[in-house]
Amino acid sequence: MLADRGLSTVYDLIVVGGGMAGASLARRMAVGGARVLVLEREMQFRDRVRGEALQPWGVAEARQLGVADLLEPRSAELRWFDQIVDGQHVMKRDFVATTPHGTGMWGFYHPEAQEILLAAAAAAGAEVRRGATVRHATPGQPPKVTSQAGTQTAEIEARLVALCAGRNPVLRSQLGFKVRQGSIPLLLSGVWLRHLSSDVDHSVAYVANNLITGAVAALFPQRGSPATIAVA
């Protein structure tokens, strides 16, 4: 159970990182009655043009977590998957008809989705601290984190600490995790395309492959906008 030790509160769960994964976890645990603290370093989520599409299995998981109703109004349902190989259209797949969960992909603006989920975590009772950077994570009973916000530093402990901070190499190395890389180097970048032709079907996710260079380009339409995300 929770306890107070001096001026510091022992939480059930500390979530490091308030993005989509961290905020969804925090909300679910808070709904279940846990005392949750979310430490998010960014005061406003930045546009990185990544993660703008949720695969069908991710949509199913969002429903299981109880956050689908939050994301769906801001998402375009991409029912179809068009694949183009070396300039030739080779496949049009109906996700609803061919996936186990009978759902398409969802296309949404990632920073907006992050804000929606983090606000939902706070509404469910999680304590959210923004502008808080976790400098250290210490395993043990209980585990602890050292958080810095401006000039203020605090050591906070919980029954469980979940690291949802993306590619934070400092915390990984402190806890002894080794980074393992595959043998195929990948380079990922993204760009917004706006004011596209009306011929672009906004219910379709487009993926084009070049078998000679190995390049892949994926375009994910967004809801209520003529803009399309292109990730190459």
Image (spheres, rainbow, N blue to C red):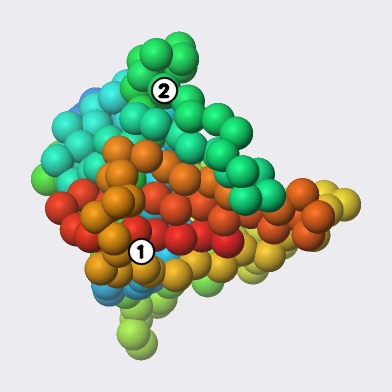
Q: Which mark is residue 40?
A: 1
- For label 1, the SS is strand
Q: As drawn, is 179 to the left or to the right of 94?
A: right
Q: Would residue 226 be visible to someone looking at this image?
A: yes
Q: Earlier in the sequence, mark 2 or mark 1?
A: 1
Q: Position of residue 50 (x, y in %)?
A: 46, 59
Q: Nearer the viewer, residue 169 or 49?
A: 49
Q: Residue at x 39, y 59 (%)?
A: 229
Q: Residue at x 34, y 59 (%)?
A: 228
Q: Residues under labels 2 and 1: Cα distance?
A: 38 Å
Q: Give the vertical position of 211 relative to 2 (above or below).
A: below
Q: Residue at x 34, y 85 (%)?
A: 150
Q: As drawn, is 70 to the left or to the right of 57?
A: left
Callout 2 amino acid: Asp
Q: As drawn, is 155 to the left or to the right of 226?
A: right
Q: Which mark is residue 94?
A: 2
Q: Residue most toward the bottom?
A: 151
Quadrant occupied by the N terminus: top left
Q: Residue at x 46, y 60 (%)?
A: 230
Q: Position of residue 143 (x, y in %)?
A: 53, 48
- For label 2, the SS is strand
Quadrant occupied by the C terminus: bottom right
Answer whether labels 2 and 1 touch (C-beta < 8 Å).
no
